[in-house]
Amino acid sequence: MACNSSTCNSSGCYKGYEEEEQPKPNTKAAVNGGNSCQNLCVKCKVNEPVCCGIGGENSRFCKDCFKNNLYGKFKQAVTYNAMITPPDKVLVAFSGGTSSRVVLQFVHEMQYKAQKNYDANKDKSLPVFGVGVAFIDESSTHSFTSLHIEKAIEDIRLIVSNLAPPSKELFVVPIESIFSSDGIDGKERLKELLDAVSDVTGKEDLLIRLRILLLQKIASENGYTRIVLGTCTSRIACHVISATVKGQGYSLSADIQYVDSRWEIPVVLPLRDCPAQELNTLCSLDGSLKIVELLNGPCSGINGLVSSFVKVLQEENPSRECTIVRTAGKLTPFHFNRVPEIHDSNVPSATRRHQKRYTLKPNGSLSSDSFCPICSSPLKKSNFPSSLRSHGNQQNPDLIASACSSCQFQILPKDPSLMEEFLSVLPQQMITKAKHGDQGDFSLLREQIQEFLLSDGENEI
């Protein structure tokens, strides 16, 4: 939360990131004190408050200050973690809900300001990052009418087209296209895959993985360098508890950081410090932030129970979600929880210096060479079977043995006779990951020896 002190150096203060000028405090009302000051926004001391942050009565904001405070959290996350640089092409995952709507708006505002600076700059040396929007149509996994789906997609197209220039390309891609370009074949394979998973929680978790794989496919095929998710504090708090219950404690820290570069295209979470309550409030206050009725039903199984539990905790104490995430944040991150270092000469040196200063250092992180082929969770070396090193080209033993304990228990079929059919309908990306997972991730090693490597333009002596 932003404060009013000019000497505040607190890491939680977002004052420096609120770029819009705030009106001067109403000193007359402040001098009168008492009830007059209590009825004013805690930030600008001019306007009447219309909403509260998670701090309750001690964080009463007017509409503009409330939005600026949220935008400040977003901008600080983006800046400190080098999530978006001028040469980037950013793909925003948009579901139509409040979190994805807010992150799309904030990314758009960043791009709009960058475009204004570019137009005002004579030398045009600093490019403006590109923005695209991706909507994953999961209607094939739910019983919705075609009219409902068409209306939702039309609303999403309208939301994206109404954003001010620069223009943004919209991708509407059905979830089954992760299997094949043939829609009919893809739907059949998706249905067979989900039917093979008897556990309700396992089905939900598998759909989440298919969604991220499809986002990776869209980004890779269209030249995007970042994927932005609208995952907020509330969502992460639920994941912390559910992952612990599922036995994913070792890999938990990999999923809750600002940056996740275990994928080909790094995934970033700029709303990590923004609770759902505040995002919902912003959308209700700002009439321009239209949302679309979510096409997905409520979670069930472990995920649903945890969501209900966290909701009860939040009602008792509005800061409980932030406490959960802040506590889990003390876990040691992995080496891929940072944006890879930039060695492109076209990127301004100031950007490269800033990234080197704020991103995670290799010696302060965990290293993992093995990942679950289904959920991509990092695995302990002690849990990675030695049989995989000697049978690296056999499809079935590799994928079964290299899966984490959570996926083996909740996703893989219990009946051995069903395993062959299950493996035959898995996306090719998961099969490939199982075959080549033992090769490890050499990005960390490359960074450690980067200064000793020859560049493309240098000749050997």
Image (cartoon, rainbow, N blue to C red):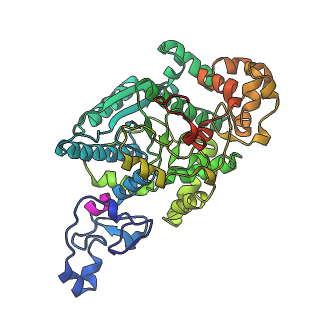
Residue 328 shows in the view: yes
Q: Quadrant of residue 451?
A: top right
447 to the left or right of 50: right
Q: Residue visible at 73% across and 34% down?
A: 408
- Residue 27 lies, with reference to residue 161, above or below; the image says below
Q: Please give the count of numbered marks on the rendered protein.
A: 0
- Residue 326 x %, y %: 55, 61
- Is 382 magenta? The answer is no
Q: Residue visible at 53% across and 33% down?
A: 454
Q: Nearer the viewer, residue 146 or 125?
A: 125
Q: Nearer the viewer, residue 205 or 452?
A: 452
- Return the residue found at the far front: 461
Q: Nearer the viewer, residue 199 or 222?
A: 222
Q: Residue visible at 52% across and 22% down?
A: 178
Q: Residue visible at 33% across and 48% down?
A: 106
- Residue 197 x %, y %: 67, 29
Residue 198 shows in the view: no
- Residue 424 lies, with reference to residue 439, above or below; the image says above
Magenta residues span 63-68
* Chief SS of the magenta region: helix
141 to the left or right of 305: left
